[in-house]
Image (cartoon, rainbow, N blue to C red):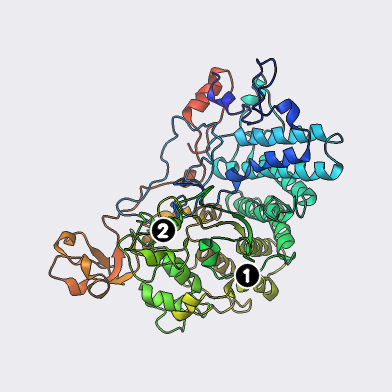
Amino acid sequence: MKKNIIILFLTLLSVSCEDFLERPPLTQLNDETYWVSELNVRLFSHGFYSNYFVGYNTSYATDYAPMRGYTFSDDLATTGKQVNFENQPPASRATTSETAAWMSGYAGPTWNFSWVRKSNLFIDRIEGMKGSHLTDEEYNHWSAVARFFRGFEYSRLVSVFGDVPYYENLVGDNELDELYKDRDDRGVVMDKVYDDFVYAMENMRVLDGGSKQNLNKFIAASFISRFMLFEGTWQKYHEADNEKAQKYLQLAVEAGDLVINSGLWSFGSDFRSLFGSQDLSGNSEVILYRHYDAALVKHSIASYSNVNEGQSSAANLDLARSFIATDGLPYQLSTVPDANKLDIDNMIKTRDPRFEATFWDVPLVKSATLLYSDKFIDRIGPTYAGSGYPPMYGSNTNTNDAPVMRLAEVALNWIEAKAELATLGGVVITQGDLDVSINAIRDRPLDAVAIAKGVVKTSPLNVSSIPNDPNRDPDVPELLWEIRRERRMEFVHEHTRLLDIKRWKKLNNMDGSVNPDILLGPWVDFPNEMPEFLVPEKEGILKIEKEDGTVITYDGANPTQMVGFYVPENISNRDPFSDRVYMAPVGENQISEYAERGYTLSQTTGW
């Protein structure tokens, strides 16, 4: 068997046949005879979907799934010592699996180029069908689809490793100079990705095969806005390359324009219905979703929001503080009554409606921080607590649909890209820009449950009176700060937070010595809200922190003093880390395999 680096580039197609057979087996598809119709091309493209449009994943799988997968950021805390950043290169980092393998500490894929090869093979086979089995229009569309997936994969690889080998064509097993090529510069790779994305936006169909859930121009543009925002801000904050930053950010804006100006989607759904619905086909905000069915494919994400299942990584005080009051101001500046009270009950009433739609009403011991998220389940599911859950709400038999891409992300990608361009000499943000993005999101309808609790919509953001948050980082302008806050409120437990603070060069937010609120939970009145904690077993363990930073430990004789910010049990800061953790190292084995053949694979900078 060849070493890992060669294995990485083997064809991983279900349509292949064994070379030593005289004729292909009748029960298998043959690569030589497969590429004869557009239908076959479409079917092959669907093989990419589960890798790139993961949704809630399947069964108990957590890769790229909200709640269970994205657990490493400054939004969340655990009991005990916080999860550390990687501190040394691994022995091996290579894999050839086609499953959605990833590394949670980087929110991206491992060192795996099988999907790059699959995209290049797709491009090659489509090229061979041009004029014979595909019309010009069909060829343009499907080559756009294949190039989009290649750009998708390289965007993720670059977000994790920075410089990576770029492969534009199929590479044969004997082309060792190509197989063992060293990394290409990040800028070179992302310029190629840029070209793929431009081609995709220009050539992909508006609708393919009559289904809005087949990859089309709008779905592609939505993801392009994500990846180009990431790379544009990375170039600005890490590389100080304003020219490249402007190039990528401008494409993010153009991609957002395409989706927003289409008028095909609107903010007509209440927030909770985006995540707990059994059928998202009619949801006006959802651009792409993954459908689940009890007879076909199920997941477990709803069960981890059912108020009975434990949340070992849970929302911390830093995240809770970031939610604005309903007057649109940071709580320290708000005139909303009791906005300065940071217990859950008051925050439900005084904060942006997304707080109530994301978190349970009272502190729960099932959460490591006592702030429990019930975001990924409908309003009915938690009512079964204590009486047994139907399959749709328990175990790994959940069937609520997953929003893979929604209008809110496109709108927030778009407004941030425009605001970043404005700092680089571009057009200034107008009230109209805010109204079709942040303010449209804030104007979502409220569901009956939220209204019954007294929740109200948040006031719009006014371009002439951007709040000046006293906690704002001084190197971030007020408008960008509020845009970043909007993302944080919108995407709790979803894919964005770690990637956001990475691209903004703000990983220090995850250092508890710099940001102590990440090591605390909400304000809890234990004598009145959780008297069950005031027992001998909790003596010397239960702790709260007062507003002035004083920590009080329960000793059995001081129950009335146990009112303050909850200190998760035995919590401690993660080990110190440096800027090298923005990028992942490759495996020592992969470097050695290159060297054994006379080639060099460079290690990631700093490692």
| Quarter of the figure with the N terminus | top right
Q: Residue at x 78, y 33 (%)?
A: 36
Q: Tell me if residue 331 comes above or below residue 62 in the rendering.
A: below
| Residue on which the image places disc 1 | 267
Residue situated in front as seen by the camera: 482 or 115: 115
Give the residue type at disc 1: Phe
Earlier residue among tags 2 and 1: 1
Tell me the quarter of the picture where residue 523 sits. bottom left
Secondary-structure class at tag 1: loop
Residue 294: where, in percent of width, then height? 51, 51
- Residue 480 seen in the figure: yes
In the shown orientation, is residue 603 left or right of residue 119? Answer: left
Tell me the quarter of the picture where residue 366 sits. bottom left
Residue 477: where, in percent of width, then height? 57, 67
Q: Tell me if residue 550 comes above or below residue 287 in the rendering.
A: below
| Residue on which the image places disc 2 | 390
Residue 101: where, in percent of width, then height? 51, 40
Label 2 CA crowd tier, 10 Å (few <14, some 14–19, many 20+) = few
Q: Tell me if residue 1 comes above or below residue 209 in the rendering.
A: above
Residue at the farthest left position:
557
Residue situated in front as seen by the camera: 596 or 16: 16
Q: Residue at x 16, y 59 (%)?
A: 537
Viewer-side label of 2, 1: 2
Which dot marks residue 254?
none
Give the residue type at disc 2: Pro
Secondary-structure class at tag 2: loop
Tell me the quarter of the picture where residue 258 sits. bottom right
